[in-house]
Image (cartoon, helix red, strand yellow):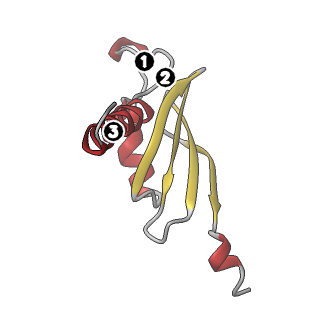
Amino acid sequence: MLSRRSMALAAMATLALSTRAMAQPSGTPPKPSDRAISMEDARRIATENGVARIEEIKFDDGHWMVEGRDSLGSEIEIRLRASDGAVLKLERERPASAKAGN
């Protein structure tokens, strides 16, 4: 039988791998010759638009989709046009605790 320590280490390793997988882009990222912004550009634009922590970034059908949280913990989803980095969609969902005050 596994010891508690072994089970804890296995759980931490599984969590670390799943967290890393979430941060990886899905789809095929654009090539430099495609005249599209890079993943780093998408990260920078998301940060400039309030994303403090990126939880997922993926390239799909000519767009970068960035999901994360702002500095207050609100969820943010941003859709960027890959050809020029234009913000096509920016949704922010305030946490339930913030909604209760209104």
| 7 relative to 45 in the view: left or right | left
Crowd around label 2: few <14 · some 14–19 · many ≥20 (10 Å): some
Q: What residue type is labelled 2?
A: Ser
Residue shown at 32%/41% (left/top)? 12
Crowd around label 3: few <14 · some 14–19 · many ≥20 (10 Å): few
Please tell me which of labels 3 and 2 falls first in the chain.
3
Image height check: is 27 above or below 88? above
In depth, the one of 15 and 101 nearer the eye is: 15
Q: Which residue is under mark 3? A: 7
Q: Which residue is under mark 1? A: 30
Residue 101 in which image quadrant: bottom right
Image height check: is 22 above or below 75? above
Which label sits on residue 22? none
Please, which residue is most extreme toward the front here? 1
Spatial distance from mark 1 to mark 2, Cα to Cα? 11 Å
Residue shown at 47%/63% (left/top)? 70
Q: Which residue is under mark 2? A: 26
Spatial distance from mark 3 to mark 2, Cα to Cα? 30 Å
Crowd around label 1: few <14 · some 14–19 · many ≥20 (10 Å): some
